Image (spheres, grey):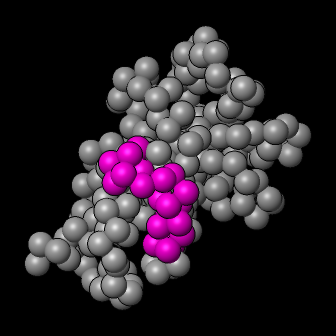
């Protein structure tokens, strides 16, 4: 299998060096480049194929969101995994609404990062407990769940699997249905909710859960 080609964008040199050493020994991951600024990173995206950007949210004078927006405008189709020392609840919600694959706290074990990368590259969402808390806080206000069409029981079950971070195959095994049936259920959820990514569906799952408790 081809290795996942990674671009690291972080303004702390020691963090970049440590992370590069961690990833270079992984058989399925390849650190293509590491950059301190979004300008340097943009040049890499123009010149080299990248599957995943590990992006520090706080780049000193810049914010990672600006780089995400510009990268999408220039045609980058890969995935983003935010790596951060801290984000507000509103910023965490905004990141997921922008379609990032997940939020990884810098205080977490470096070894867990490889698990997060692999999960994001399969189309899943990586969230730590702080990020989930931010989403829960967001659901305390009127949200999308009250506006969407009614979910079927099967769609609710698929949505629960997405919330728990299960793969399509794992959701299918739990529900005793085929993986293609899970994908069909996801497409229905995307259509009904008006979102485009699994990370946004995680937020919908939280809203649905909160609505069910009221």
Of the pair 128 and 121, the residue shown nearer to us: 121
* Horizontal side of residue 6 vs 164, given as left or right: right
The quadrant holding residue 36 is top right
- In the picture as drawn, the residue positioned furthest to the left comes out as 214
Describe residue 213's horizontal placement relative to residue 208 as left or right: left
Prevailing secondary structure of the magenta residues? helix
Question: Residue 98, image x and y in percent?
Answer: 54, 63
Q: Residue at x 72, y 26 (%)?
A: 1
* Above or below 115: residue 154: below
Q: Quadrant of residue 67?
A: bottom right
Q: Position of residue 56 (x, y in %)?
A: 54, 41
Query: Residue 103 occupies which quadrant of the picture?
Result: top left
Residue at 46 percent across and 81 percent down: it is 192
Residue 61 seen from this side: no
82 lies left or right of 105: right
Position of the C terminus, as image quadrant, is bottom left
Residue 173 part of the magenta-drawn span? yes
Name the residue rendered at 24%, 62% in the picture.
136
In front of the other: 81 or 159: 159
Farthest residue toward the right? 47
- Of residue 121 and residue 66, the one placed in the foreground of this image is 121
Picture coordinates of residue 121, whole percent (x, y): 59, 41
Q: Is residue 133 above or below residue 33?
A: below
Q: Considering only vertical position in the picture, is 208 above or below 17?
A: below
Residue at coordinates 76% horizontally, 53% vertically from top-left? 76
Report whether residue 129 is seen.
Answer: yes
Count numbered badges in the picture. Answer: 0
- What is the magenta range? 170-190
Left or right: where 9 falls relative to 77: left
In magenta segment, residue 84: no
Residue situated in front as seen by the camera: 147 or 53: 147
């Amino acid at each position: 299998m081809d290795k996942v080609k990674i671009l690291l964008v972080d303004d702390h040199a020691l963090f970049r060096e440590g992370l590069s050493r961690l990833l270079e020994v992984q058989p399925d991951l390849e650190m293509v480049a590491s950059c301190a600024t979004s300008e340097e990173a943009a040049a890499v995206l123009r010149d080299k194929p990248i599957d995943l950007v590990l992006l520090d949210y706080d780049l000193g004078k810049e914010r990672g969101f600006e780089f995400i927006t510009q990268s999408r405008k220039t045609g980058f189709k890969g995935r983003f995994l935010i790596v951060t020392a801290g984000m507000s609840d509103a910023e965490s919600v905004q990141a997921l609404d922008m379609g990032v694959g997940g939020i990884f706290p810098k205080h977490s074990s470096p070894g867990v990062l490889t698990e997060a990368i692999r999960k994001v590259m399969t189309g899943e969402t990586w969230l730590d407990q702080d990020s989930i808390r931010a989403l829960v806080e967001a659901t305390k206000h009127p949200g999308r769940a009250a506006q969407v069409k009614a979910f079927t029981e099967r769609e609710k079950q698929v949505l629960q699997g997405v919330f728990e971070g299960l793969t399509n195959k794992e959701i299918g095994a739990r529900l005793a249905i085929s993986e293609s049936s899970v994908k069909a259920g996801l497409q229905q959820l995307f259509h009904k909710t008006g979102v485009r990514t699994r990370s946004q569906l995680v937020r919908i799952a939280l809203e649905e859960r909160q609505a069910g408790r009221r």
